[in-house]
Amino acid sequence: MNQQPPMPHACVREPVTLINAFTVPPEESDRFLVRWKDNARVMAGRPGFIRARMYRSLVDDAELRFINVAEWESGAALDEALANPEWRASLQRVLDDPDLHITPRPVVCQVAVEVNPGDRL
Amino acid sequence: MNQQPPMPHACVREPVTLINAFTVPPEESDRFLVRWKDNARVMAGRPGFIRARMYRSLVDDAELRFINVAEWESGAALDEALANPEWRASLQRVLDDPDLHITPRPVVCQVAVEVNPGDRL
């Protein structure tokens, strides 16, 4: 399974969030998380990385079983990280693992609305 | 379009995150956000609500065009909020709007891995 790097976001100087929703067979969850942590370790060392949270659905058979929400200082920083050979190799190991049958759905976003308790919006 | 309230999570005393990825036709984005803010205003007034961020994809034709990430103090608090008649009515107005053709994909999650800069994981 091959995946090209996402489209460049070099013109985006504001913070961006890479959200990746994964379909993962329940029995492959542990293996997926081990592989993903290898990838996250590389990500966590790149300039402009702010924070990531990998969320797991409370139910095993959810189509969007794992959802990674990773904040970056800018689209440019994300693009540079995505182009890093070590990260690309690490990501390829996740995608090429013959014992993993996952479907990633990456999307690069910006915050449209932030809501805090009691906000009147 | 009808949608039943999600399955109860009353036994979950830890924080949960409701992630809802929406497919939204690009020309309906503004209307969707207006409607969603009405819903978010009700959500923001419920006990146990911590914070929500509505993310918008940088590209118009993404399948997951809008993604709401809403943090709650517990699964029990989320369940109580979801059962609130005002919230349900507000949500129904979003789903029943004849000028909106959206597909929601709600999933209730917990944080499996948190990653900060330089983490060795």
Image (cartoon, coloured by chain):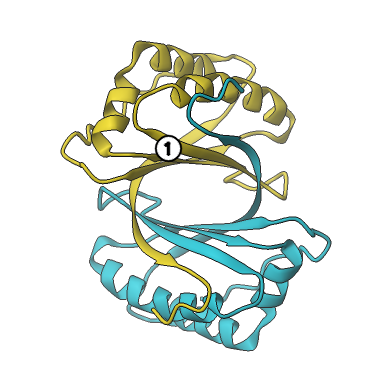
Chain colours: A cyan, B yellow
Count of numbered tags: 1
Comparing A104 with A39, the one in front is: A39
The x and y percentages for residue B63 are 59, 46
Is residue A44 toward the left or the right of residue A59 in the image? right
Choose top left, top right, bottom left or bottom right for residue B11. Answer: top left
The x and y percentages for residue B79 are 27, 29
Label 1 Cα crowd, 10 Å radius (few <14 / some 14-19 / many 20+): some
The residue depicted at 64 percent of the width and 48 percent of the height is B62
Is residue A12 toward the left or the right of residue A82 in the image? right
**Is there any visible trace of residue A44 in the rendered image?**
yes
The x and y percentages for residue B100 are 61, 22
Comparing B108 with A48, the one in front is: A48
Q: Amino acid type of disc 1? A: Ile
Judged from the image, the secondary structure of the residue bearing numbered disc 1 is: strand
Q: Outermost residue, left direction?
A: B11
**Is there any visible trace of residue B4 in the rendered image?**
no
Comparing A117 with B76, the one in front is: A117
Chain name for mark 1: B
Compared to residue B97, the image places residue A8 above or below, namely below
Q: Outermost residue, right direction?
A: A11
Q: Locate the C terminus of chain B by quadrant.
A: bottom left
The x and y percentages for residue A107 are 61, 55
Q: Which residue is mark 1?
A: B50
The residue depicted at 32 percent of the width and 78 percent of the height is A99
The residue depicted at 30 percent of the width and 19 percent of the height is B83
Q: Locate the N terminus of chain B by quadrant.
A: top left
Compared to residue A10, the image places residue A57 above or below, namely above
Choose top left, top right, bottom left or bottom right for residue B111. Answer: bottom left
The residue depicted at 25 percent of the width and 53 percent of the height is A60
